[in-house]
């Protein structure tokens, strides 16, 4: 593993991510109009109550819904769907962030609103999405479900609405009911639950896997880590400031954009070989679009390599034990998905920077959605990392032969 080359690439990506942060456009959500000034969140008033709950609590609930829904083929379209539906429901006094049960009590209205807003967004976003993805506007669909093949489009809006919208709303409701049993009336029940975890990474894992409150199949690992990214860094709703709640205390929200960019630019191929990735079922031969090899980046998690450099290993041990807090003692091997965290930690220490996983991920999203398209002719000449990209400069097969 060429640590110097990887550090240069990670630093460049973090710089790009800082300049191209993904904006949540909270001003589009009508119930949040008093939370903002000049489209920026008023942080001094996060503790101010908005009805029964604080503004911080209501925003955290919004983020939770967002990350569960944020698995469709068009990020901007998905987020517009969320903001538009919530705005329309609140206009009808169906206040699903404050009263989660409203969604189910008025299920007919909820589903009709989802359908109507989806059709409106499809008219605007369909042609744009189709052009970028070499597809047809009629294929534009933000309704999806989990299958053995990963995320797939579906037509059944009831399945989508109850599973994707209903599961996180039911989580909020269950937290409230459990507190009522204990005769507690908290104004931040979700916040209290989230920040009981020792680190943002443990919190992200709990979002999916907790026996009582876990979202299960309604969300993937990517969504849980996206929540950590938004909660800790981009919206900065966290109340804790210890090492377990910093910008390197959660994993990258790996998705197809991240996998495609990191594979083509050479980040992954400097860590492991093509044969390694095939043996780990990360590269699946012939299973991609047009019979290209498919890169299933979500299978990257948990794959381990050795690092023989004592200084690097010491930094990694510190990362795992004191930041991610997923081990009590130093692990024997390095998990590949933690290498971005490790490199950012080192860069910050050596160069007095404050880069985060959020910066790294925003760069991957920016490049993946604007330059590194999932076909044979991405916009490599305009890509901001083309000077460092192996696929562009040395090995065109990394672009031609693989899909995500």
Image (cartoon, rainbow, N blue to C red):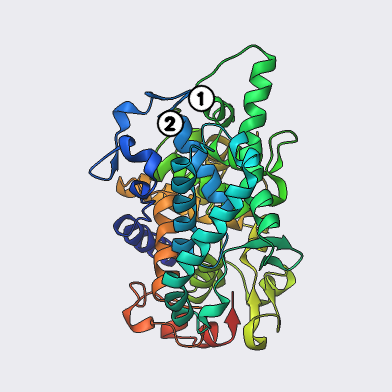
| Quadrant of the image occupied by residue 307 | bottom right
Q: Callout 1: helix, strand or loop?
A: loop
Label ID, residue 387: none
- State whether residue 403 is above or below residue 115: below
Q: Earlier in the sequence, mark 2 or mark 1?
A: 2
**What is the tally of numbered marks visible in this picture?**
2
* Residue in front for this viewpoint, 386 or 105: 105
Mark 1 = which residue? 188
Q: Are the residues flagged by discs 2 and 1 in contact, CB closer than 8 Å?
A: yes
Place of residue 186 in the rendered image (x, y in percent of width and height, measured from the top left): 54, 18
Q: CA distance from mark 2 to mark 1?
A: 8 Å
Mark 2 = which residue? 56
Instruction: Please tell me which residue is depicted at 64% across the width and 11% down the height of the picture.
Output: 183
Instruction: Please tell me which residue is depicted at 65% across the width and 77% down the height of the picture.
Output: 294
- State whether residue 2 is above or below residue 81: below
Q: Quadrant of the C terminus?
A: bottom right
Place of residue 209 in the rendered image (x, y in percent of width and height, measured from the top left): 71, 42
- State whether residue 336 is above or below residue 205: below
| Quadrant of the image occupied by residue 271 | bottom right
């Amino acid at each position: 593993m060429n640590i110097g080359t990887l550090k240069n690439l990670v630093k460049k990506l973090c710089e790009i991510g800082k300049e191209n942060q993904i904006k949540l456009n909270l001003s589009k959500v009508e119930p949040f109009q008093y939370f903002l000034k000049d489209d920026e969140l008023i942080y001094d008033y996060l503790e101010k109550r908005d009805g029964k709950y604080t503004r911080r609590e209501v925003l955290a609930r919004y983020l939770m819904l967002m990350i569960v829904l944020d698995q469709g083929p068009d990020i901007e379209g998905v987020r517009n769907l969320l903001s538009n539906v919530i705005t329309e429901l609140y206009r009808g006094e169906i206040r699903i962030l404050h009263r989660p049960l409203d969604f189910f009590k008025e299920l007919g209205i909820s589903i009709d609103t989802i359908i109507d807003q989806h059709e409106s967004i499809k008219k605007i976003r369909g042609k744009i999405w189709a052009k970028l993805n070499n597809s047809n506007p009629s294929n534009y669909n933000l309704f999806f479900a989990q299958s053995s093949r990963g995320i797939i489009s579906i037509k059944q809006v009831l399945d989508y609405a109850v599973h994707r919208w209903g599961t996180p709303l039911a989580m909020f409701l269950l937290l409230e009911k459990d507190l009522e049993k204990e005769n507690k009336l908290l104004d931040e029940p979700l916040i209290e639950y989230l920040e009981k975890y020792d680190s943002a990474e443990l919190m992200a894992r709990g979002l999916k896997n907790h026996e009582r409150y876990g979202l299960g199949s309604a969300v993937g690992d990517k969504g849980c880590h996206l929540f950590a990214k938004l909660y800790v860094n981009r919206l900065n709703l966290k109340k804790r400031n210890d090492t377990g709640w910093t910008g390197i205390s959660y994993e990258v929200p790996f998705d197809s954009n991240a996998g495609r960019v990191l594979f083509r630019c050479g980040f992954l191929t400097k860590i492991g070989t093509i044969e390694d990735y095939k043996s780990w079922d990360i590269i699946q031969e012939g299973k991609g679009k047009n019979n290209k090899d498919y890169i299933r980046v979500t299978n990257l998690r948990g794959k381990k390599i050795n690092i023989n450099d004592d200084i690097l290993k010491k930094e990694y041990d510190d990362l795992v034990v004191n930041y991610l807090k997923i081990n009590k003692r130093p692990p024997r091997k390095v998990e590949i998905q933690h290498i971005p965290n490790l490199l950012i930690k080192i860069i910050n220490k050596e160069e007095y920077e404050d880069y985060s996983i959020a910066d790294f991920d925003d760069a991957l999203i920016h490049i993946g959605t604007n330059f590194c398209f999932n076909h044979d002719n991405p916009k490599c000449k305009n890509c901001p990392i083309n000077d460092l990209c192996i696929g562009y400069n040395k090995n065109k097969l990394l672009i031609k032969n693989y899909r995500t």
